[in-house]
Image (cartoon, helix red, strand yellow):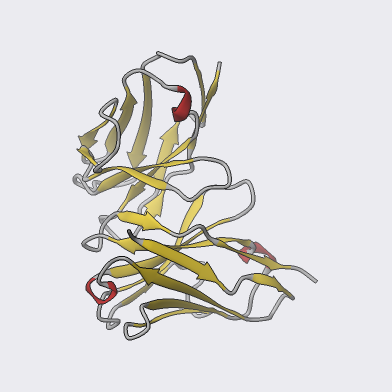
Amino acid sequence: EVQLLESGGGLVQPGGSLRLSCAASGFTFNNYAMSWVRQAPGKGLEWVSAMSASGISTFYADSVKGRFTISRDNSKNTLYLQTNSLRAEDTAVYYCAKVRDLQSFDYWGQGTLVTVSS
Amino acid sequence: DIQMTQSPSTLSASVGDRVTITCRASQSISSWLAWYQQKPGKAPKLLIYKASSLESGVPSRFSGSGSGTEFTLTISSLQPDDFATYYCQQYDSYWTFGQGTKVEIK
């Protein structure tokens, strides 16, 4: 059974940083691209970032480019999102998702809440 | 950037109704489109990929159609478990979601 478990969310002040983690199990992690998607309270889904299976290719939404960094450790079956220079508008539930063939997102975690507030 | 626009934003329907949600892309995305269902407090669930392919385990009352810039998700006979918010997503160039369509009880 595929499982994705996010962690690392919390309350942070504007300008602060957090590192989110996504522990994967139930599939061959190093065969699949992975992605982060966020959802602000009461709002829709926003794609944030993705990384290829090998880790060589990374992709970012314009809204986070230069502030967020995606990475993965295939030996630990874990995906990361380093979030820096956080703003109030980054407040959201952050989901990690498994990407099938660099296309649709076939499995999702339950999300971790990031709140940016003073 | 490719923009995705869904309509309507909210849809009121009854159990047994046939429901159709439309998604339009700002430029052609061929058939690189997925549909997701999300219930409150839960993660999204993949329903349809490549515009019309039904994800394994998804009931056959869900179907998708379209190509290019216009796509539809149809629920042939709405069930109580189907009241949720639905999102389209393009993956022709990076990934973009539509703003969502909430299907509520009439």
Relative horizontal placement of residue A77, taking residue A21 as reference (left or right):
left
Q: Tell me where residue B86 sits by quadrant.
A: top left
Across and down, in percent, residue A94 comes to 53, 63
Residue lying farthest front? A1
Q: Tell me where residue B106 sits by quadrant.
A: top right
**Number of numbered discs on residues:** 0
| Residue that appears at 67% across and 70% down | A10
Residue in front for this viewpoint, A117 or B71: A117
Residue lying farthest right? A118
**Whether residue B60 is situated above or below residue A48 in the rendered picture:** above
| Residue that appears at 31% across and 20% down | B76
Across and down, in percent, residue A96 comes to 44, 64
**Whether residue B32 is situated above or below residue A55 in the rendered picture:** above
Residue in front for this viewpoint, A86 or A98: A98
Q: Tell me where residue A31 sits by quadrant.
A: bottom left
Task: Tell me the quarter of the image containing the N terminus of chain A.
Answer: bottom left
Task: Tell me the quarter of the image containing the C terminus of chain A.
Answer: bottom right
Residue in front for this viewpoint, A24 or A86: A24
Across and down, in percent, residue B92 comes to 25, 55
**Whether residue B75 is situated above or below residue B29 in the rendered picture:** above
Relative horizontal placement of residue A2, taking residue B100 as reference (left or right):
left
Q: Is residue B68 visible?
A: yes
